[in-house]
Amino acid sequence: MVTAAAVWDALAEIPDPEIPVISLVDLGVVRDVAVDGDNVRVEFTPTFLGCPALEVMRDAMAEKVRELGGEPDVRVISDDSWSSDKITPEGREKLRVAGLAPPAPREASAPTLLQLQSSAFRCPYCGSTDTKLENIFGPTPCRSVRYCNGCRQPFEQFKTI
Amino acid sequence: MSERAQRLLELADDELILGWRDSEWTGIAPTLEEDVAFSSIAQNEIGHARALYELAAGDLDTTADALAFDRSPEEYRSAPLVELRRLDWAHTIARHWLYECADELRLAELKSSDDAEVAGLATKMDREEVYHRMHAQMWADRLCGEERFESAVDELWPYALGVLSPELRTALAERVGREQVDAVERGSHSDELRELHEEMTMVRRSIPGATW
């Protein structure tokens, strides 16, 4: 008999395909798990709709459910139910340790270029806030590229979304 | 076809075709950072197209891939603005800026739609488009007043109006500081779209019905 708790635990073992230091559960993209007999419905919202890892994540979750003996129904929810605020505190720390600055909190109004150009973003390597925006975009849609004047290292910043 | 499906396809086709046009800068943009930026924007626009096609596919009993790649060029509903192939930086930024300004107005309308699925998706898209708009505005501010950029904006302005329904065009004219003129409307396609379609569907046509 599959339980929702067992499914959550299993999903917590799946690394994000592009940022493998953090699991899908730490990333907060799993919105709901519902178990009805052998049928397991998992709802998840991608970080960005342009995320190239969408299919990989969906297939990995379905596989985990099958390993537990369940029949998976993994649904992609394309609405605003995920935000970068959903990343767990553990997840944020794992990002930082891996050299990826965690996102700033979402505010009522959308982020502005002026905010991104300010130096109030902390370098994940040395902790300095003397950093500057290099590129709004980066290697994946969810990341920007910044440069730390303190330790002279470029680093990636998880976007606020 | 329902009005909802038609609207979704208009949006999806705009985002897909523009995503392809943006991706044409991959590897050849004027600076490395812009290479990264346009590639990332392209990827995200195509992601938006996918989500919109999936919603439309549910209504039309088909699949997102079939909608994206199995229609003939004449069946696309994209605006002529996104179809143009103008590989110079002034036109690229002019289109990028005009499109993002128009798209912001369009998404604002969809976010308040009574249709929860459409409103939810529009809200998600809008959160992401914030970064595209920032990028477009940064370049527009930088190039503002430059002759090549201004003449590119003038040339593309009638096309930009054609992205929006007539009731949103006044707001767009105010936003970009231009007088309303006759719009280049949706409905007819350029040879540029046919060329792009040929390339875009080539792999899928090579083995019909294959699972990739």
Image: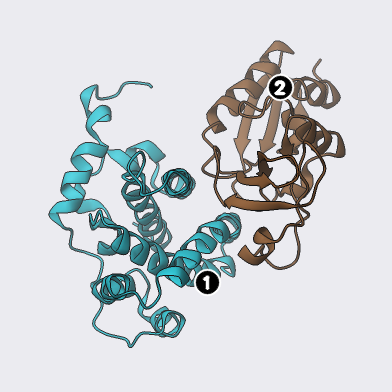
**Residue B200: assigned label:** none
> Residue A138 lies in what quarter of the image?
top right
Q: Position of residue A47 (x, y in %)?
A: 63, 43
Residue labelled with disc 2:
A14
**Residue at the image point whose x is 68% and y is 44% from the top:** A157
> To which chain does the residue with label 2 belong?
A
Residue A136 position (above or below residue A112): above
Amino acid residing under circle 2: Ile
Residue B28 position (above or below residue A97): below
Q: Nearer the viewer, residue B20 or A154?
A: A154
Q: Give the chain letter for cyan.
A: B
Secondary structure under the numbered disc 2 in the rendered image: loop
Residue labelled with disc 1:
B109
The answer to whether B22 appears left or right of A79 in the picture is: left
Crowdedness near tag 2: few (<14), some (14–19) or many (≥20) residues, C-alpha within 10 Å? some
Q: Give the chain letter for brown.
A: A
- Mark 1 against mark 2, which lies toward the viewer? 2
Q: Are marks 1 and 2 in contact (CB under 8 Å)?
A: no
